Image (cartoon, grey):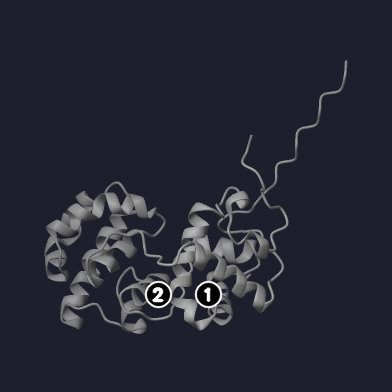
Amino acid sequence: MPARPAKPKRIDHGSATAPRRARMMPAAQAEAFIRSLAVANPAPETELLYTDPFTLLVAVVLSAQTTDAAVNRCTPALFAAAPTPAAMAALGAEGIGPYIRTIGLWQGKARNVAALARDLVDKHGGQVPADRAALEALPGVGRKTANVVLNVVFGQETMAVDTHIFRLGNRCGLAPGRNVREVEERLVKRCPPALLRDAHHWLILHGRYVCKARAPECWRCVARAFCNYRDKVLAPPA
């Protein structure tokens, strides 16, 4: 009997906590990579639904370890019931919980949202502060959440590194780093200043829809020519 053909070796493209790491791009190559994403999506926006700084802050807190789509399914009803910090604080964790049961870690998130709403009322006059230290002092708000709020609603040139950007920065060689802070700092240094604010969105969306966790879809990547990843997937699975 003829020998069976060997199965093609399955390539491990890395994981969220241990992404593959490519050789770091030179500065000019990194700029070309980012500009390719910019040309393909000239007006990027967050996919989270919000109406003001407060609702964006809550949506980002809820999005931790959960997809934006899942958050968007529950926040319209929550924000209709509690559109302001005072109303959210009055609702309390027990009142917030039923609105967000469908997302991960909902019990802890309900407590954090209720507590941050109380802090906004008690310490900030019901307003979301445009200051990193004040934001990060709020319950449930870390550096990434603060970066998103400062970027989206206050126009600051921040880089919020989530799992998508951490993976992308390492896998393609744009900004390899051992942790999210290293990746963030390298991206800020290597991104052209005029593109920095929008780069946060370009990279998140590219990691979410093209350079995916399980396997990158390199055959439709607009920045492929500038990517240093060695095991590119150049055709869809058969």
Against 191, is 13 above or below?
A: above
Residue 177: image x %, image y %?
62, 71
Q: Which of 225 and 229 is in front in this view?
A: 225
Residue 137: image x %, image y %?
32, 78
Against 133, is 92 above or below?
A: above
Q: In which quarter of the image is residue 91?
A: bottom left
* Label 1: few (<14), some (14–19) or many (≥20) C-alpha neighbours in 10 Å: many
Q: In which quarter of the image is residue 173?
A: bottom right
> As shown in the figure, which amino acid type bears the numbered disc 2?
Asn
Which residue in the structure is indicated by mark 1?
184
Give the left or right position of residue 118, taking residue 146 as reference: left
At mark 1, the secondary structure is helix
Quadrant, the N terminus: top right
Count of marks placed on residues = 2
Residue 47: image x %, image y %?
36, 59
Q: Residue at x 35, y 79 (%)?
A: 155
Q: Residue at x 39, y 53 (%)?
A: 67
> As shown in the figure, which amino acid type bears the numbered disc 1?
Glu
Which residue in the structure is indicated by mark 2?
147
Label whose residue precedes the other's in the sequence (1 or 2): 2
